[in-house]
Every structure is written in structure tokens, then in C-alpha cells.
Image (cartoon, grey):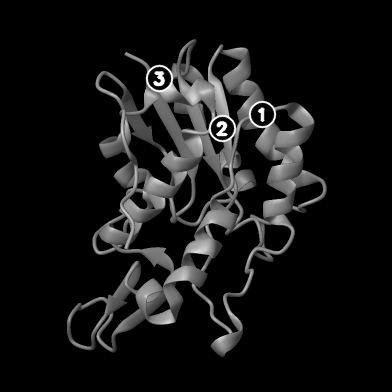
Amino acid sequence: MPTIYIVGDSTVDDNTPPFRGWGWALPQFVAEGVKVENHALSGRSSRSFLAEGLFEPVEKAISKGDMLLIQFGHNDEKDDERHTDPDTTFPEYLWKYCKTALDAGALPVLITPVERRLFMGDQGVMYTHGEYPRAVRTLAAEKDLPLCDLNADSHKLYVHLGQDRTAELFVRIQPGENKDFPDGHDDKTHFCAYGAQVMASLVVSEMKKIPACLPYLKDGSAEVLP
């Protein structure tokens, strides 16, 4: 049984409801007989995911015919021990994941970090990840690796939907609704279950442009869009 392994952060992680990452929703789009193992974990960067040994189970298990989906960036931006530089250490760490897959005979697929929900009034959606998406694109081009540009696709979707409809993709909690958020919560980074499905459909739409990815996916449309 071929396996799609996923590494990443909270926007990819299965998470705890009402929070869901797109990796949680991916299994509904894969072909029969393909297994999905989501190893993504909240708060991790490309550096800390390796440093904490979180990649070790994937390293030991991945083999010929498998796929590795890689999306980091949100926490690489943080000014702490998780930080990486988009021109040096960030692509270096991403390449370590890719090389592990290649050495095992598996297919690595790089994914640019999904956009946050930050609007500038009537001026559109902010680009919130600086040079990190560019670093992923550059590495993919230099190493001739498959790329899913989720950053560009999610940004385009938010612009199309507008501020109010885009908010429906994210976790929003009313005051008194959840004991962990007694004053309510309006998240601009993390998706609800519906949003996770939409983001997964964007990833799959990108994968369908890559011939090597097609055997892993269901036939037909991948769209779960508003």
C-alpha cells in the first residue's frame, strides 16, 4: 500500500476540533489503496521538526512508491529557536526532507505556506509570509522538484471570496461557546473543518498538475470550494 506522508505545522496538523489542518482533510481525495499518515504538528518549523525527532518515524518507514508532502514556513518566521533564514537555513532544512524521500525512492512534493487571513480594508489581502514562499519555489526550481503553490492559490481564493466569506474558512468562536476561549476567538491562521477541506482541495488541484502525483489521487474534481 503506497503511503502519503505529511510533515508541517498547525495549518497542516490533524489538530483538535474546532481546529483542523488541511492534512486532516486530505484522505478524502486520495485513491483507493493509498494510505495517508499526517505527522504534522502544531508550532513546528522546518528546523524544530527535525530537532525534536519528529521526522524519525517517517525516515524509518518511507520507501519506494511513497510520497512526502512538505509544508513549513509559519513558525520558521518566528524570532526564537525555531527560526530559519529564507535564503539559507530554510531551504537547507527543506532539502533534508526532500533528500530523505529521494534516497528512499519516494516522491517529495514541496508546498508553499498557506496564507493567513489578513485583509487591508478595501486594498486586498496581505502577503504574510515574506520571502518564505519564494524560498520554496526557488528550491523546487533548482532541484527540479514537484511544487504545490498553496500560498499563491490561497491568496487568490481569499481575494475572490472577500473578507467575510474568507472568515468562514477559519476558526471563529463566540463568547461563552468554548471554555478554552471564554471571551471568544477570531482566528486568522487556523482553519475549521470546512476550511481544511477547502485548503486540501487546493493542494490536490495543484497535485493534479503533476503527472507523478496522479496515481495517488481519486479521479474527478477535487474542488470543495465556496
Identified at 41% across, 27% down, the residue is 4
- What residue is pinned by disc 1? 145
The amino acid type found where label 1 is placed reads Leu
Q: Is residue 161 visible?
A: yes
Indicate the position of residue 187 as horizontal and vertical percent values: 40, 75
Measure how far apart labels 2 and 3 are at the Cα level.
Answer: 14 Å
**Residues at badges 1 and 2 in contact (C-beta under 8 Å)?**
yes
Find numbered disc 1 in the image and state the secondary structure of the residue it sits on: loop
Vertical placement of residue 87 versus 212, above or below:
below
Q: Can residue 53 be seen in this view?
A: no
Frontmost residue, 150 versus 41: 150
Horizontally, is 102 left or right of 35 in the view?
right
- What residue is pinned by disc 2? 109
Identified at 52% across, 33% down, the residue is 209
Indicate the position of residue 147 as horizontal and vertical percent values: 61, 37
Rendered-image quadrant of the C terminus? bottom left
Horizontally, is 131 left or right of 162 in the view?
right
Find numbered disc 2 in the image and state the secondary structure of the residue it sits on: strand
Measure how far apart labels 1 and 3 are at the Cα level.
Answer: 17 Å
Frontmost residue, 170 versus 49: 170
**Residues at badges 2 and 3 in contact (C-beta under 8 Å)?**
no
Frontmost residue, 195 versus 153: 153
Vertical placement of residue 216 versus 88, above or below:
above
Rendered-image quadrant of the N terminus? top left
Residues packed near mark 1 inside 10 Å, few (<14), some (14 to 19) or many (20 plus): some
Horizontally, is 6 left or right of 99 in the view?
left
The amino acid type found where label 2 is placed reads Val
Vertical placement of residue 211 versus 72, above or below:
above
- What residue is pinned by disc 3? 215
